[in-house]
């Protein structure tokens, strides 16, 4: 496969993953109400920077370590706790009216709020399925590219990251534009919905990790 074919293939696979609801989607919606259309690309920038390091680590042999049962369980439990902590923080912002202050403009983020780039890193690290996706599907996608050399690996990465920027950039722009028609109450409800989604995902990760820890049948 040539570089263009590798990039397009990675874009399609990446887009299918990006469009699946998850913590990055919930955070993009919430931060876009607060910060505007730049929030989505900034979150993806943090996510993409971390992916470079993860890909390098996987190609260096990290995948063998990630296949261990104890590691998978630890990722699930740690990720669940991190997502719940982020959800609690988001709920506190909504309750204190730091989520949005006016239906006609974006509320300034509080000084203690995580920058979207940092948030993108934290969300990625807290999602065990993202790490395991790269250790399985992602690595299978990278394997033929590795055989062709680093330009092919770069093409796969560019296609994958391009899908993330395209999707979350579009979501962020749509939410930021739509904020003009959001009442303060509706904006709070949106913030609570995003909070609930992150709490639910965190709960799923904790539940799955706990069942693995207790030796129950896997629910993956």
Image (cartoon, rainbow, N blue to C red):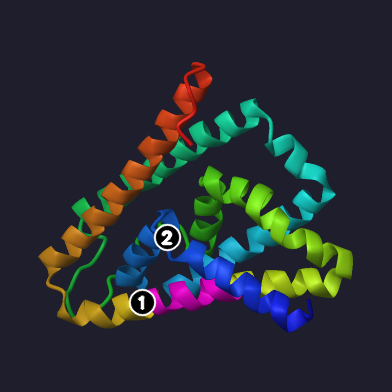
Residue 191: say if magenta.
Answer: no
Per the picture, the main secondary structure of the magenta-coloured stretch is helix
Residue 166: say if magenta.
Answer: yes
The tally of labels here is: 2
Where is mark 2, residue-wise? Answer: 20
Task: Look at the picture and state if 100 lies above or below 135.
Answer: below
Left or right of 150? Residue 197 is: left
Where is mark 1, residue-wise? Answer: 36
Q: Could you say where residue 18 lies in the image, as x and y percent from the top left?
A: 48, 65
Q: Earlier in the sequence, mark 1 or mark 2?
A: 2
Q: Could you say where residue 69 lies in the image, as x and y percent from the top left?
A: 63, 27
SS at circle 2: loop
Q: Who's the residue at 56% across and 72% down the image?
A: 12
Task: Look at the picture and state if 188 lies above or below 162.
Answer: above
Task: Look at the picture and state if 137 lies above or below 202.
Answer: below
Magenta-colored span: 162-171
SS at circle 1: loop
Left or right of 145? Residue 136 is: left
Q: Who's the residue at 45% across and 23% down the image?
A: 211
Q: Could you say where residue 101 lies in the image, as x and y percent from the top left?
A: 20, 69
| Residue 37 visible in the snapshot | no
Q: Residues within 10 Å of mark 1 (few under 14, many from 20)?
A: many
The residue closer to the viewer here, 60 or 108, is 60
* Cα separation between marks 1 and 2: 22 Å
Residue 169's quadrant in the figure? Answer: bottom left
Task: Look at the picture and state if 15 lies above or below 76.
Answer: below
Q: Residues within 10 Å of mark 2 (few under 14, many from 20)?
A: few
| Discs 1/2, front | 2
The residue closer to the viewer here, 99 or 164, is 164
Q: Quadrant of the N terminus?
A: bottom right
| Residue 212 visible in the snapshot | yes
Q: Which mark is residue 6?
A: none
């Amino acid at each position: 496969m040539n570089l263009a074919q590798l990039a397009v293939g990675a874009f399609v696979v990446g887009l299918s993953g990006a469009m699946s609801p998850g913590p990055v989607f919930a955070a993009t919606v919430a931060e876009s109400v607060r910060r505007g259309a730049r929030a989505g690309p900034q979150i993806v920038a943090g996510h993409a920077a971390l992916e470079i390091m993860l890909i390098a680590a996987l190609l260096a042999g990290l995948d063998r370590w990630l296949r261990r049962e104890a590691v998978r369980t630890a990722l699930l439990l740690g990720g669940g706790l991190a997502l719940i902590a982020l959800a609690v923080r988001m709920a506190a912002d909504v309750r204190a009216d730091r989520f949005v202050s006016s239906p006609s403009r974006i509320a300034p983020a509080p000084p203690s709020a995580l920058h979207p780039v940092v948030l993108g890193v934290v969300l990625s690290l807290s999602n065990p399925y993202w790490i395991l996706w790269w250790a399985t599907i992602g690595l299978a996608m990278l394997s033929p590219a590795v055989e062709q050399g680093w330009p092919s690996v770069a093409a796969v990465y560019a296609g994958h990251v391009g899908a993330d920027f395209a999707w979350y950039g579009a979501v962020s722009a749509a939410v930021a534009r739509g904020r003009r028609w959001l009442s303060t109450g509706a904006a709070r409800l949106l913030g609570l919905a995003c909070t609930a989604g992150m709490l639910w995902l965190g709960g799923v990760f904790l539940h799955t990790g706990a069942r693995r820890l207790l030796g129950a049948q896997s629910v993956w």
